Amino acid sequence: MRTQPNDSPIRISIISAVRFLRESLAEVLPREGTLAISGIAADPQSAIKDLAGNQPDIVLLDEALPGGPAAVARIRDVAPQSLVVVFAVAETADEVIAWAEAGAAGYIPKTAGLADIGPLLVGILQGKQVCSESVVAGLLRRLSSAGNTNRGNHGAVPAPTLTAREAQIAQMIVAGMSNKDIARCLNIGLATAKTHVHHLLGKLNLHCRGQAAGWMREHCDRP
């Protein structure tokens, strides 16, 4: 949880490739006096040049940016005290978990209105995050699955159990689908699809997509 002096506005940097979107947010968000804009950028690379010296309280990152999850790590490297908040996120458990695993401190759902963004950002800075019931349920299932796996690790390490989404993505990889194909098929952002693939390969301890076919053949009887 971050603390903020009562008389000090929260400093926000906005990163979005859509010019009217980042400029509109920069104009609207400071109106109530709670937020102040410390910078805007069209892409993470140009933003990173300023973040090291700027060190805003929050970096507001557009979910639609290519390579967004990787950008979260780069932003945290140069601005470790800044919280990365992703906006316009589809509020599903898979999407939210993927961004959390990438290092995001919070998210603004794509259903939020302009008037909602300020209070949501203040809450995230205070260590709070409003989530839908489906997201909370998905997080609980993920934690429960991880706990069961850890309790069962006696002796030989069992092959990891895939979630339904992970198994679906594994099958798509085996079928030769690209990240763009996977994103289109699952109706998710390309950056999110890349994150899913990256974490799946890491979970299976695989070094490349081509090894997924062998893993699936060996463990095809597992859920």
Image: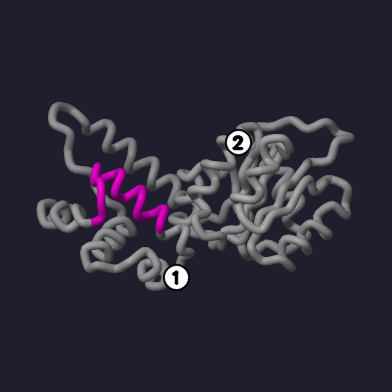
- Residue 163: tell me if it is visible: yes
What secondary structure is the stretch in magenta mostly built from? helix
Judging by the rendered image, the residue that carries numbered circle 1 is 187
Give percent across and percent down for residue 65: 56, 60
Q: Which residue is nearer to you in this view: 105 or 207?
A: 207
Q: Amino acid at mark 1?
A: Asn
Residue most extreme to the left: 218
With respect to residue 201, does 9 lie above or below?
above
Residue 132 is left or right of residue 148, and the answer is right
Residue 102 location in percent, x, y? 48, 45
Helix, strand or loop under label 1: loop
Image point (13%, 54%), residue name: 214
Is 15 left, or right, of 180 in this rendering?
right
**Residue 185, picture quadrant:** bottom left
Residue 63 appears in which quarter of the rendering? bottom right
Q: Amino acid at mark 2?
A: Val
- Marks 1 and 2 close (CB-CB < 8 Å): no
Q: Nearer the viewer, mark 1 or mark 2?
A: 2
Q: Which mark is residue 135?
A: none
Q: Write down the region rendered in magenta.
A: 194-209
Q: Quadrant of residue 173?
A: bottom left
Comes first in the chain, label 1 or label 2: 2
Residue 78 - label: 2
For the C terminus, the image quarter is bottom left
Q: Quadrant of the N terminus?
A: top right
Place of residue 114 in the rendered image (x, y in percent of width and height, measured from the top left): 75, 62
Determine whether the residue tagged by mark 2 lies in a helix, strand or loop.
helix
Decide if residue 141 is on the left or right side of residue 83.
left
Residue 26 or 104: which is nearer the viewer? 26
